[in-house]
Amino acid sequence: MSQKTCPYCAFTRSWILRRAKRKCKRCRREWSEKRCPVPNIRSTETEWNHCIRVFLRERTVRRIIEETGIPHCRVERMMQHLRRCMTECLPHTFSGIVEMDETYIGGQRKNQHLHIRRIQGKRGHGTDKLPIVGLFSRNSGEVYVEVLKRKLDVKHIFTVIEERVQPGSILYTDGFKMYRGLKETLYVHEFVDHLQGEMVRGDIHTNNIEGFWGILKRKLGCIGGMRRQYLPLFVAEIVWKFNHRKVSLLEQEKLLLTLIRETKFGGRS
């Protein structure tokens, strides 16, 4: 038996069990010599630091494994846990001028199965791709993005606006008919009609949120194909990095370390 102090009763006699775990002879409780900040993921704080540092440099999982020496299965769980934490890190409610728009995410038709390609697909509204709704605050320069499960739901979108935008704010959208009901709410609504060739009218436009859609799709294209159930995790990663783009990498690393300590869910999805 090794002279290790029990963290629960301070007894010095214990024995080794498995995977660096020990069991106290007095209180019979198990404890680990490794200090892991995240339950169910056997990675020390030093390994998390190294992994986050490489992760913030837009490196792939393979590159993270090469630079950190952490096993592949554990790196995958660490990346998934980081992205789940990012989904919980939401910006403050927006105020002032807020731009709102929607886009659709899905693979190219030429890469889909033959029985899907034979079906005449639609472009824009009515497509079978996953819809994504986004808000851009001109005051803070932050975005809020939500991936919808199936199709655009007017009631759900109005609920998102009520939760994420303060009453009395100014909402700028395109001419999609779904947004016309905003005039009957507590918000000031203005829109530009893209179908009529109107992109900008004075200060009224949606160029900022549309510019973010370009960033989102380029980064998702670099990641490659993914299952639909994991799309919100990758979107949350891109949104978090965009909202913290003015923060140094060192500060981002500290924020993520604090974030993974404060989350309550475990490492497995």
Image: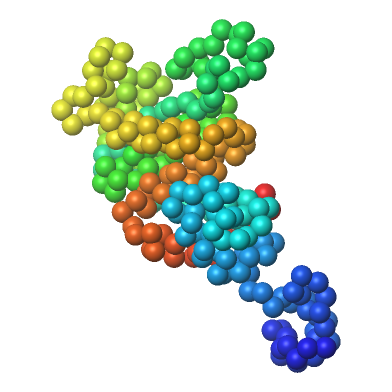
Give percent across and percent down for residue 171: 30, 33
99 or 234: nearer the viewer: 234
243 vs 132: above or below: below
Specify whether 109 is left or right of 35. Answer: left
Q: For residue 34, which quarter of the picture?
A: bottom right
Q: Quadrant for residue 138, please give it.
A: top left
- Of residues 229 and 59, the one nearer the viewer is 59
**Percent from the top left, x then y, of residue 99?**
31, 34
Tally the numbered discs.
0
Q: Residue at x 29, y 17 (%)?
A: 194
Horizontal and vertical percent for residue 129?
54, 23
* 124 or 164: nearer the viewer: 124
Q: Residue furthest front?
A: 66
Q: Residue at x 56, y 69 (%)?
A: 45
Residue plotted at (59% across, 55% down): 65
- Whether residue 216 appears in this view of the structure is yes
Q: Is residue 259 visible?
A: no
Q: Residue at x 55, y 70 (%)?
A: 46
